[in-house]
Image (cartoon, rainbow, N blue to C red):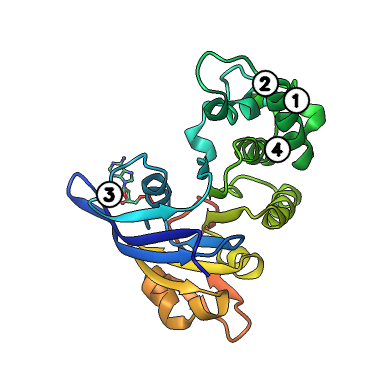
Amino acid sequence: MAPVLEVRNLSVAYNGSQALEDVSFRVQQGERVAIVGPNGAGKSTLFKAMVGLIHPLSGRVEAKGAGFGYVTQRSAVDWTFPVTVHDVVMMGRIGKMGWLRWQRLRDREIVRRSLEQVGLLEYADRQIGELSGGQQQRVFIARALAQEATILLMDEPFSGVDSPSQEAILEILEHLRDQGVTLLVSTHDLNLAVERFDRLALLNRRLVAFGTPQEAVTPSTLAAAYGGQALWRGEDYALVLGDIDCCGETEHSHE
Ligand code: ADP
């Protein structure tokens, strides 16, 4: 089967320092891919290059269908901007509406259905900044649905989100497959990636491994992606990632 997405020999540099080097992989329609790697591995850069926000040094990205929906990291959004949940999702329709055209009944209906799908219809008139982090992520999933995106890219959607909200997001993402939506999610949570995704891309500037979690996660690929910081605990993919420069959650004890 032809892939819905193909990244070929992608290299990206910022001011001469290389953030991605010769990254290639293919994704089939409906697959859920976790992009995993340490801080600075190039995960955000990969997404930005895929949607055309930055120009690669070389390589290409080929996508079939109506295109990408891109959900940036929470920190990249100004949450004080006064806009309602409904309006954020309606922004997904703008490309479809064209310039100088009023919202049609159909646009409103699609927005309503998208909000319903993520369980937030009753929040339509709230300000986006009033919602919890997990709910905000769901609003942006609804926006991508309204946009009729066929490939959804989400950058660290679980960071700063409590575990019931994480579960709610994961369940929504699992249903997207039924609609043929392909999903790429970056996360620093290797266990989550192994347990809940079909494919795993281990990234550290280069693509260290790409495949099913069983194929992609081995002692040697972990060592290549994380250096000496990953500990392998046997065959069950119980992984301990200690002391990684990530997320500020690790506590260190000093005597
Ligand atoms: P990740 O999302 O995996 O944490 P990034 O894609 O944000 O990684 O960053 C990859 C590398 O590129 C890092 O070394 C980072 O410092 C660098 N980088 C990212 N964005 C920029 C930028 N706008 N200008 C210069 N360097 C950048």
Which residue corresponds to the image point at 72% horizontal and 52% vertical from the top-left? 163
Q: Please determine whether, in this image, residue 190 is positioned above or below residue 222.
A: above
Instruction: Please tell me which of labels 3 and 2 falls first in the chain.
Output: 3
Q: How many numbered circles does the render carry?
A: 4
Direction from residue 231 to residue 110 in the image, left or right: right
Picture coordinates of residue 91 (x, y %)? 58, 26
Of circles 4 and 2, which is in front?
2
Contact, mark 3 vs mark 2 (Cβ under 8 Å): no
Quarter of the figure with residue 178: bottom right
Instruction: Please tell me which of labels 4 and 3 falls first in the chain.
Output: 3
Instruction: Please tell me which of labels 2 and 1 falls first in the chain.
Output: 2
Which residue corresponds to the image point at 54% horizontal and 54% vertical from the top-left? 185
Q: List the residue tagged with mark 3.
A: 56
Instruction: Please tell me which of labels 4 and 2 falls first in the chain.
Output: 2
Which residue corresponds to the image point at 58% horizontal and 56% vertical from the top-left? 182
Picture coordinates of residue 96 (x, y %)? 56, 29
What amino acid is labelled 3 in the image? Answer: Pro
What amino acid is labelled 1 in the image? Answer: Ala
Q: Please determine whether, in this image, residue 12 is positioned above or below residue 103.
A: below
Contact, mark 3 vs mark 1 (Cβ under 8 Å): no
Contact, mark 2 vs mark 1 (Cβ under 8 Å): yes
Mark 3 secondary-structure assignment: loop
Mark 4 secondary-structure assignment: helix
Mark 2 secondary-structure assignment: loop
What amino acid is labelled 4 in the image? Answer: Gln
Q: List the residue tagged with mark 2.
A: 84
Give neighbour class at mark 3: few <14, some 14-19, many 20+ (Cα, 10 Å): many
